[in-house]
Image (tube, grey):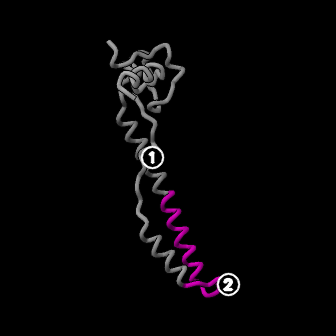
Amino acid sequence: MDKESILELQKLDCNCNDCIHQVRDNERFKASLEQHKGWQLDYFNTLKNNMLKKADWWQNKKNPKYNIEKGKNLKKEANKMRFQFDKKQASINYGFCDKLKKNISWIPNILQLHTQECFKHRRTP
């Protein structure tokens, strides 16, 4: 898409991300990122711990499906795992609307019907 088409689409979407009245709240956004990072880290640790438990299960001699090699391979794979935070999961942005005088939140590039009346594009004279 060329720049003109992108600008026209943004005017149709009326997304707070492109509005002249929007003032970003970086502190709320950073807090949201930290919260999402914590959730993702918890999920990662759960997956890794489950993999290690499964490896122990395979290596248990009382297990009817005992397979020490399978257990070693699972442990090796679990220990290779590294946590990587995916910021795309935390796509909600925060700010303050100078026109409506209230806190706002939005997801960039998503159509917002409720802002049709108050939206003014920041790149429009």
Q: Quadrant of residue 25?
A: top left
Q: Quadrant of the C terminus?
A: top left
Relative height, residue 1 to residue 54 (above, below): above
Q: Position of residue 1 (x, y in %)?
A: 40, 29
Q: Residue at x 40, y 36 (%)?
A: 28
Residue receiving disc 1: 35
Q: Residue at x 43, y 24 (%)?
A: 16
Amino acid type indicated by mark 1: Gln
58 left or right of 89 in image: right
- Say if the magenta span includes residue 53: yes
Circle 1 — which element? helix
Relative height, residue 106 to residue 53 (above, below): above
65 left or right of 51 in image: right
Q: Position of residue 31 (x, y in %)?
A: 40, 42
Count residues near mark 2 (Cα–Cα under 10 Å), then give few for <14, some for 14-19, many for 20+: few
Tell me the magenta residue range. 43-68
Q: Residue at x 43, y 23 (%)?
A: 10
User: Is the magenta region chiefly helix, strand or loop?
Assistant: helix
Q: Spatial distance from mark 1 to mark 2, Cα to Cα?
A: 42 Å
* Residue lying at the far front of the rendered structure: 2
Amino acid type indicated by mark 2: Pro
The image's mark for residue 6 is: none
58 left or right of 34 in image: right
Relative height, residue 58 to residue 93 (above, below): below
Q: Position of residue 105 (x, y in %)?
A: 46, 30
The image's mark for residue 64 is: 2
- Residue contact at pointers 1 and 2, CB within 8 angstroms: no
Name which of mark 1 and mark 2 comes first in the sequence. Answer: 1
Q: Position of residue 100 (x, y in %)?
A: 44, 16
Q: Residue at x 43, y 41 (%)?
A: 32
Count residues near mark 1 (Cα–Cα under 10 Å), then give few for <14, some for 14-19, many for 20+: few
